[in-house]
Amino acid sequence: MTEENKRAVVLIPAYKPDERLIALTKELIDNKLDVLLVDDGGGETFRHIFDACRALGAEVAVHAVNMGKGRALKTGINAAMLKWQDMAGIVTADADGQHTPKDILRLIDALHQHPDKLVLGSRAFTGNVPKKSLWGNKITRAVYALASGVKVGDTQTGLRALPASSLAAMARIDGERYEYEMNVLLKLRDMGLGVYEVPIETIYIDDNAGSHFNPVRDAIKIYMVIFKYLFSSIASFVIDYALYWLCLGVFGLPALVSYALARLVSSQVNYNLNKHTVFGGRGGKSAMVKYYVLCVVQGLIGAGLVQVLPSVIPLSAAIIKIPVDLVLFMLSYFIQRDYVFDK
């Protein structure tokens, strides 16, 4: 069977859905698509919705209690892998009417054309867009680009096409609620996936009142994931500067020696945090070699600047080290992200 002829399964996680889910399921079934719903613990009150969808031909997986969107997506991915072993991939969509059958079909076409990429249905965010959604996406998009080096137009879209080759990895990604979808984006390099974006219609119903996204609770989870990328550099900077000040101010060692000793200790801390906490153990032995080559080059540049700049700028060596290291740490992060720990 060619890639173009393989089925794409539409996966829709739903928590307390309304009649719109039945209408969407009918349209998808009418278009000869396989539909898999996950009842995320809505209980008896909403069972008739899923029974109606099942009667139309949809498959339904059920959670006895609400477990969150991330867990519902992983439940659906696992169920789809068991039932449709010859599929091209899965298209995930929301149950609240924000994703049209027309756009779902467009993502299926893109999935067939780009079987090695995560396809995102990206909204333009024009017109009457709720401020929570507009600014939430702008901020998340900027921080995600900094953390990963990948630019996408819509980090929060629930309309995504997951290629079959990535599904086993997708089912193992951490996250039980809305942070799962951000975790997927942060794991793209580990999975060897590129990104392809398809413009879709921007639809908000009742000012997005049907969304179960909690802007405080779930945003904290999302940003905690991203800021793991920044924690390592900050922790290493604190250790580095404290040791530098101790050697220079307390023991009276020369600035060059103080800088070298502080950097030796902080580089060990930084390498282990980056490798195991930030970059998920990527790179192996080659990463260590590349990392310490970077450290030597960065250390020589930093030590030289600490020696030279006080004669140009009326600041002590201890003070001038702060802006020098801020610049070098930022440059080092980008080099580590794109070269040292790149899979």
Image: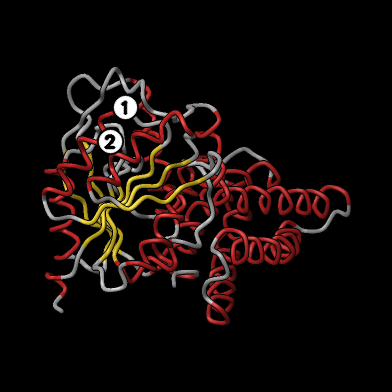
Return the x and y of residue 199 as percentages of the image width and height: 16, 43
Vertical placement of residue 125 versus 288, above or below: above
Q: In percent of the image, x 41 and y 64: which residue is there?
A: 338
Return the x and y of residue 300 as percentages of the image width and height: 58, 66
Q: How many marks?
A: 2
Vertical placement of residue 185 versus 156, above or below: below
**Of the pair 45 and 230, the residue shown nearer to us:** 45
Say whether residue 329 is left or right of residue 321.
Answer: left
On residue 21, the disc is 2
In the image as oriented, which residue stretches furthest toward the right? 251
* Dot 2 alpha-carbon crowd within 10 angstroms: few under 14, some 14 to 19, many 20 or more: many
Q: Earlier in the sequence, mark 1 or mark 2?
A: 2
Vertical placement of residue 264 versus 252, above or below: below
Q: Quadrant of residue 196?
A: bottom left
**Of the pair 297 and 75, the residue shown nearer to us:** 75
Return the x and y of residue 62 as percentages of the image width and height: 46, 47
SS for dot 1: helix
Residue kind at label 2, given as amino acid type: Leu
**Of the pair 52 and 260, the residue shown nearer to us:** 52
Q: In percent of the image, x 88 and y 54: which residue is there?
A: 251
Say whether residue 335 is left or right of residue 48.
Answer: right
Quadrant placement of the C terminus: bottom left
Vertical placement of residue 152 versus 80, above or below: above
SS for dot 2: helix
State which mark lies toward you, 1 or 2.
2
Q: Quadrant of residue 99?
A: top left
In the image as oriented, which residue stretches furthest toward the bottom? 285
Q: In percent of the image, x 22 and y 68: which residue is there?
A: 115
